Image: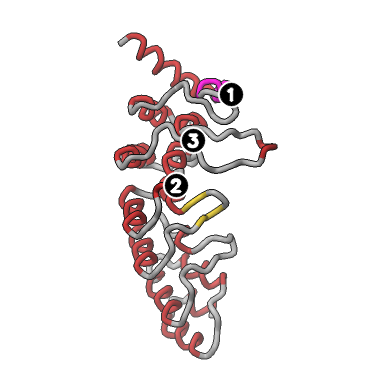
Amino acid sequence: MAAAVTSHRPSIVSYLLEQGALVSQYDIVLALADTDDAIAMFQTFLDHGWDINSKTGLGVTVLKHVIRDETLTRFFLTHGADPNFSTTPGSTILDVAAANSTPVIFDLLISHGAKLENSDALHSAAGELQKRPGRVEMMKHLLDIGMDINALWRREYPPGRRMGRGTPLHAAVSSQEKDRIVLLLERGADPQAKNTLGQTPMRYADAKGLGSSVDALREYENLSEDT
């Protein structure tokens, strides 16, 4: 089966499934790696009863793995992928999309029933740490569709980690990305809002040694005082 998936042979995969073979997690990984023929392979899996919402070895559905690809995301959603599946405790597909994909894909999830009210999407976009391009554009989009700029993050951390739930501004501070910090402040983020440990964004940045974020906050504060 794996050899047929790797060699891009949906007809052989179809034959093997008809003979009783099962789609394994390894087959899913191989199909995802085939960027040119992934849809044909997944369609073959679906034609033989594969559950599009079954979990991979990482405990998530395949939708999470294709979230950067508009064509694959659209295919999965139109074939019944659940856009409200939690990827990890307290995290949603919308959160993953906000940190990794585009406003078009984000809206595609919404149009297929993803619930914005259950999401920490703005925090996820603001706090994304891999410096993926397009996060500021995503943040603007999320604010334009009404996400609360001062909402506290919903996800709970284990008490021992001492990571209080903060606002999107706290998340942007953690990323040390000045353009994200400035955008939130310009759009009305409260620089005095506290996280659940009682820290303002500035105090949080100081405590974590986030010098770039401290500088960005101070620069904006000084600019505001001069205008």
Is residue 127 or residue 80 the one in the foreground? 80
Q: Tell me: residue 127, above or below residue 35.
A: above
Extreme right residue here? 160
Which amino acid type corresponds to the residue marked 1 in the rendered image? Gly
How would you rate the neighbour count of disc 1 (Cα within 10 Å): few for under 14, some for 14-19, many for 20 or more?
few
How much space separates mark 3 and mark 1, taking CA atoms?
Answer: 22 Å
Name the residue at 35% across, 48% down: 102
Q: Which residue is mark 1?
A: 209
Residue stretch rendered in magenta on the structure: 201-207
| Quadrant of the frame with the N terminus | bottom right
| Image-quadrant location for residue 22 | bottom right
Which amino acid type corresponds to the residue marked 3 in the rendered image? Leu
Q: Which residue is mark 3?
A: 152
| Quadrant of the frame with the C terminus | top left
Extreme front residue here? 117
Is residue 168 or residue 222 the one in the foreground? 168
Name the residue at 34% across, 67% down: 78
Extreme top residue here? 226
Name the residue at 46% across, 32% down: 172
Q: Which mark is residue 119?
A: 2
